[in-house]
Amino acid sequence: MTTQLSTLFSPLTIGTMKIRNRIAMAPMATDFAEGDGTVTQRLIDYYEARARGGVGLIILEVCTVDGMSPYIPRTLGLWDDSFVPGLKRLTDALHARGARVIPQVAHPGPESLAPLFNGTEAVGPSAGIVNNLTRMKCRELDRDELAAVIGQFAAAARRSREAGFDGLELHAAHSYMLAGSFLSALRNRRTDAYGGGLSGRLRFPLEVIGAIKKEAGDDFPITMRLSAEEQVPGGRSIQETCYIASVFAEAGVSGFHVSSGVYPDLSWRVIPPTGTPFCLNARSAAEIRKAVDVPVMVVGRIVDPGMADDIVRRGDADMVVVGRALLADPEWPAKAKAGAWDDIAPCIGCGLGCVRNREVGGDMTCIVNPAVGREKEMEIRSAVKKKRVMIAGGGPAGLEAARVAALAGHEVALYEKNDRTGGQFNLAAVPPAKQELCKITQYLTRQAGKAGAKIVLGAEVTPGLVAGEKPDVLVVATGGRARRPGIPGADGEEVCTAHDVLSGAVDIAPGKVLVVGGGMVGCELASFLANTGDNITIGRTEVTIVEMTEYVGADMFSEGRELLMEKLRHKEVRIVTSATVKKITPDGAVIERAGIQEVIGGMDRVILAMGTESVKALAEMPGFGGEIVVIGDALQPRQVLEAIREGAEVGRSL
């Protein structure tokens, strides 16, 4: 469904900033800067792609005001005048594309990586705040140090203006970093003038605002990111936030960027995962908008152009802030404006590329857009030599390979043995709140067809078919099948796989179920099956998960795992970790923990969720004269992130 988005694409003024539409890009940490905090061409290319795609305002990722307190390993710097030329190159590039740009300015405070990088303590409003990453406690800033930090904010504001930014954003949300920590009663336990009550908690951010305006001028707009509701015991309510927003507006804040939740207790509201409500902060933003006379922006799972327009048209906010959806598709605004909604690459909130990959030391990326941070490198160019390409398998890897290869000008035919595309992703979409995953394969199928690829369903690729078609290249994207390990009893009558259950091949009646394997698949399957029996028409299903490592859901991104663990607790799922399954019995399993064997019995079903194994019979075909390329799970079982990336790379390299 498409409609005219006249409200979303009307101009907006924030302070002295005149913005071409009501779409802002959310600040998201990239690690694309140099280790010394300077701008790279890679960073410019990344942001320029979003400006070229039509976004009105870009809120740059966190720019740190203190060089001794990095926020991320390659944090962007504003603590020295030497950063100005590089930042000016960035702002010039974005202005040339019609976008306005402001940095999100912050002192990381308790979130600083100083203990890892400099061997110094992190600082905060009060002693004892624990950094989730370093697991180290911060020390309390004294009054003299606070004055120096306020001076750092002021100097950073001056540099921002000199670098050509159109204003700046002050991060004061999520009971997080320095300003947010001072503002929240959850972290601010001071008894001096900078704590002890609301007026004390307001003091530090108010002094920062005053210093910024004095140094950068009244005509340099300040926006502020605020948590509308902290939503944990002792946290701030929407009523309190409405009041403090009016205080900040009177002090000179030109606009508010409304989020919700706190770190670490409710981080899923800060980065909402798959299955959480869309536009989840819109109602809170509407309340703040009633309390202030300056524009209000709202963030939080705004992925659909129609919903975005509705937020603005209804008056909940003056501007929508879009984050991960602009990673998935930098041209989201332009496609929305043109009515080409079906051509927008969908964000499903999985967090695998943008968050999880960074958590494990990789680059920021996106499952549906591997070109994030590689915009120039991954540009699709017309092939010098057109080839006939046969793709075996219509899962995400094969579909992406077909889409990209067809766009490059190759003659592409994709064969899928089932009656629909999607492969294992169709199974992943079955558990509760995971239906959004279907958007990915629907999008890839649609775009591959639009690009000119022929898609043949119900046709399995065989050596005979390959011999008859005589392609120049055979791309083997045949995926994987459920793995049945060599555990005694694994082939028993009451044993099945997660694939069997999710595909509907095996029905699980109410009773007792043992799930062997506590990765994402096993945990989501447990959530799918478990029921407390409070509704007697459904019946009780008791689920036990056995996992060999210390944690279940370790292959998930943090916020998604947090929410899933909450569901498993609510559904009374028993979790046994650090346990090796030695034998599967007719009614359970024999496990070993810390060298001691135990018996888990009384089970009606045992379900194996122990990963997949490659299906790649086509990888070797004696007598085939063309090139064979194996991608996705057919190459090595992993996540969809790697599958689509390999499809994209193969499509570009043929």
Image (spheres, helix red, strand yellow):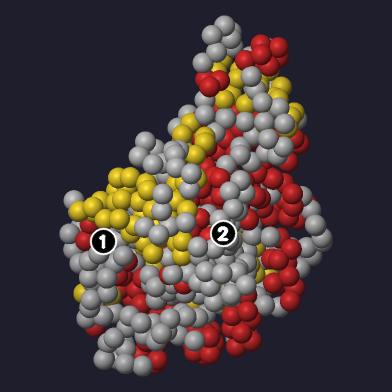
- x then y, percent, for residue 52: 64, 48
Among numbered discs 1 and 2, the one appearing first in the sequence? 1
The front one of 555 and 137 is 555
Q: Amino acid at mark 1?
A: Thr
The answer to which quarter of the image holds residue 451 is top right
Percent x, y of residue 470: 67, 12
Q: Marks 1 and 2: which is nearer the front?
A: 2
Residue at horizontal 32 percent and vertical 83 percent from the top: 188
Q: CA distance from mark 1 to mark 2?
A: 45 Å
Residue beneath the point at 59% across and 24% down: 475
- The type of residue carrying mark 2 is Ala
Q: Disc 2 marks which residue? A: 509
In the image, residue 482 above or below residue 143: above
Residue 633 versus residue 333 in the image, above or below: above
- Residue 582: name its quadrant: top left
Left or right placement of residue 155 versus residue 643 in this view: left
Q: Quadrant of the C terminus?
A: top right
Where residue 40 appears, as percent x and y from the top left, is 43, 45
Q: Find residue 195 and report its horizontal and vertical position in percent.
A: 32, 89
The image's mark for residue 492 is: none
User: Image point 26% across, 91% down: which residue?
Assistant: 192
Q: Mark 2 packing: few (<14 Cα in 10 Å), some, or many (20+)?
A: some
Q: Which residue position is annotated with label 1?
A: 134
Whether residue 296 sits left or right of residue 491 in the image: it is: right
